Image (spheres, rainbow, N blue to C red):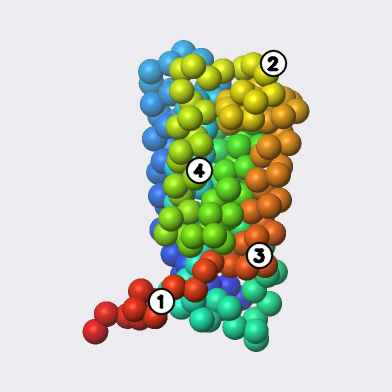
């Protein structure tokens, strides 16, 4: 398993895991202190998940783009595994709150939002690279948590604000699923775009 340790270290996964843990814990503490509800509301949960996903988004490419595209390694399988493990890690961290008095619930909403935002981040990585992959999730999340957004019977509103729609909302679930599957396939098959050598070469 030495290759796995090297892979995780080269992708800065320990740093991302620590950052995601800190962000999720901070949102949980604030909810515990400043609200009486046992369930962390969908807006706070969505913002927290977005920030945790952004932390892991930085791990979706390595320092050497040429190495990430070499034919001697089964990169599609490795990239897919990396993305799925990132999703599992974020979901596990959020699920730990169910042992306390302030919880990220329901689980269906946590899974939907994590999968959708991670897929959107992976899609961004495939198109513009990991360094900019956080932009689309940030913009969509900020739009979804606007005060004018909320549970709605209008399909267009449900799609625009899928992050805060109740669990089980069909349009929101479909939107998140499409983002998750599209992002997974695009990232697994393509990876990130090749950057100029000047951007990846070590400083001398």
Mark 3: few/some/many CA within 10 Å (<14, 14-19, 20+): many
Where does residue 108 sit, x and y in percent of width and height? 69, 32
Cα distance in 3D space between marks 4 and 1: 25 Å
Could you say whether the residue bearing mark 2 is in a helix, strand or loop? loop
The circle on residue 170 is none
Quarter location, residue 158: top right
Q: Sequence order check: which comes first, mark 1 or mark 2?
A: 2
Q: Sequence order check: which comes first, mark 4 or mark 3?
A: 4
Q: Which residue is mark 4?
A: 137
Could you say whether the residue bearing mark 1 is in a helix, strand or loop? loop
Relative height, residue 167 to residue 86 (above, below): above
Where does residue 104 sit, x and y in percent of width and height? 56, 29
Q: Which residue is mark 2?
A: 153
User: What residue is at 70 percent from the left and 44 percent from the top?
Assistant: 178
Q: Sequence order check: which comes first, mark 2 or mark 3?
A: 2
Where does residue 96 sit, x and y in percent of width and height? 56, 37
Which numbered mark, 3 or 1, is in the foreground of this view? 1
User: What residue is at 69 percent from the left and 16 percent from the top?
Assistant: 153
Cα distance in 3D space between marks 3 and 1: 21 Å
Compare residues 89 and 172 and report the one nearer the observer. 172
Could you say whether the residue bearing mark 4 is in a helix, strand or loop? helix
Q: Are marks 3 and 1 in contact (CB under 8 Å)?
A: no
Q: Sequence order check: which comes first, mark 4 or mark 2?
A: 4
Left or right of 32? Residue 149 is right
Q: Which residue is mark 3?
A: 188
Q: Is residue 84 visible?
A: no
Mark 4: few/some/many CA within 10 Å (<14, 14-19, 20+): many
The circle on residue 196 is 1
Q: In which quadrant will I find the C terminus?
A: bottom left
Q: Are marks 2 and 3 in contact (CB under 8 Å)?
A: no
Quarter location, residue 91: top right
């Amino acid at each position: 398993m030495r290759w796995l340790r090297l892979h995780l270290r080269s992708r800065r996964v320990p740093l991302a895991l620590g950052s995601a843990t800190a962000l999720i814990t901070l949102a949980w503490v604030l909810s515990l202190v400043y609200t009486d509800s046992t369930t962390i509301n969908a807006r706070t949960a969505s913002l927290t998940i977005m920030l945790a996903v952004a932390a892991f988004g930085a791990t979706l490419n390595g320092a050497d783009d040429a190495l990430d595209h070499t034919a001697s390694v089964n990169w599609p399988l490795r990239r897919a595994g990396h993305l799925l493990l990132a999703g599992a890690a974020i979901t596990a961290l959020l699920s730990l709150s169910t042992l306390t008095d302030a919880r990220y619930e329901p689980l269906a909403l946590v899974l939907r939002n994590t999968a959708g935002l991670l897929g959107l981040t992976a899609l961004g990585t495939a198109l513009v690279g990991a360094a900019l992959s956080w932009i689309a999730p940030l913009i969509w999340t900020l739009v979804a948590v606007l005060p004018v957004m909320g549970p709605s019977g209008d399909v267009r509103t449900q799609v625009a604000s899928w992050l805060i729609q109740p669990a089980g909302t069909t349009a929101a679930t479909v939107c998140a699923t499409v983002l998750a599957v599209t992002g997974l396939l695009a990232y697994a098959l393509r990876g990130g775009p090749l950057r100029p050598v000047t951007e990846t070469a070590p400083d001398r």
